[in-house]
Image (spheres, rainbow, N blue to C red):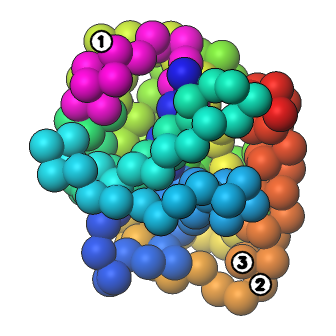
Amino acid sequence: MKVIIGLGNPGEEYERTRHNVGFMFVEKVAKELEFPEFLLKKKLSAYLSETVLNGDKVILVKSDTYMNKSGEAVLAVKNFYKINDEDIIMVYDDYDLPIGTVRYRENGSAGTHNGMKSCVESLGTENFKRLRIGINAGLPVEDLSGYVLGRVTPEEMAKLRASFDEAFLKLKDLLAI
């Protein structure tokens, strides 16, 4: 079993914001690989979509908690499905990377990302895979919170789509599909 968790904030007011890149990516995966519709699992505080690919169960997750409490939903999903840490792939925005850039890591620290800090704290480990998608457009930013919660511009979206394509190829490789 593999679990791909897109980090973001729930609600219409956060749709298409830079901080919801993780949600946008798992939605792309769901569409490309023909997953069923995401359904809210209240006791897990998450929206899930499940399918079987090459004989393995794959679950896509979008938390129904705010970013800084993502770990609560991640831990609930992990415990409910009895998932091993090495079968978790976390996908999230990264201000430290230029927009359009994708970085894959087997494990590592949460860095400055509050959603990842919550996940590491809740899981009690840094030993899970992650796909980081850059959101830094290269302009001076005085208010980082305002920037990450700001809407993606059309120019940024074009670059993000390219990075989603790159991340999708990496994910397909990780899932051996």
Q: Which residues are magenta?
A: 75-91
Residue 114 seen: no
Q: Residue at x 52, y 78 (%)?
A: 16
How far is the residue under mark 2 from the one under mark 1? 38 Å
Q: Mark number for residue 124?
A: 1
How far is the residue under mark 3 from the one under mark 2? 5 Å
Mark 2 lies on residue: 155
Q: Residue at x 86, y 44 (%)?
A: 169
Q: Amino acid at mark 3?
A: Met
Q: Specify the quadrant of the image occupied by residue 157.
A: bottom right
Q: Position of residue 53 (x, y in %)?
A: 70, 35
Query: Does residue 45 appear left or right of residue 18 in this picture?
Result: left
Q: Quadrant of the N terminus?
A: top right
Q: Is residue 64 magenta?
A: no
Q: Mark number for residue 157?
A: 3
91 to 23, vertically: above or below: above
140 to 8, vertically: above or below: below
Q: Amino acid at mark 2?
A: Glu
Q: Residue at x 83, y 34 (%)?
A: 177
Q: Specify the quadrant of the image occupied by residue 4.
A: top right
Crowding at mark 3 (Cα within 10 Å: few <14, some 14-19, many 20+): some
Q: Are marks 3 and 2 in contact (CB under 8 Å)?
A: yes
Crowding at mark 1 (Cα within 10 Å: few <14, some 14-19, many 20+): few
Q: Position of residue 114 (x, y in %)?
A: 34, 42
Q: Nearer the viewer, residue 106 or 137?
A: 106
Query: Does residue 10 appear left or right of residue 140 in this picture?
Result: left
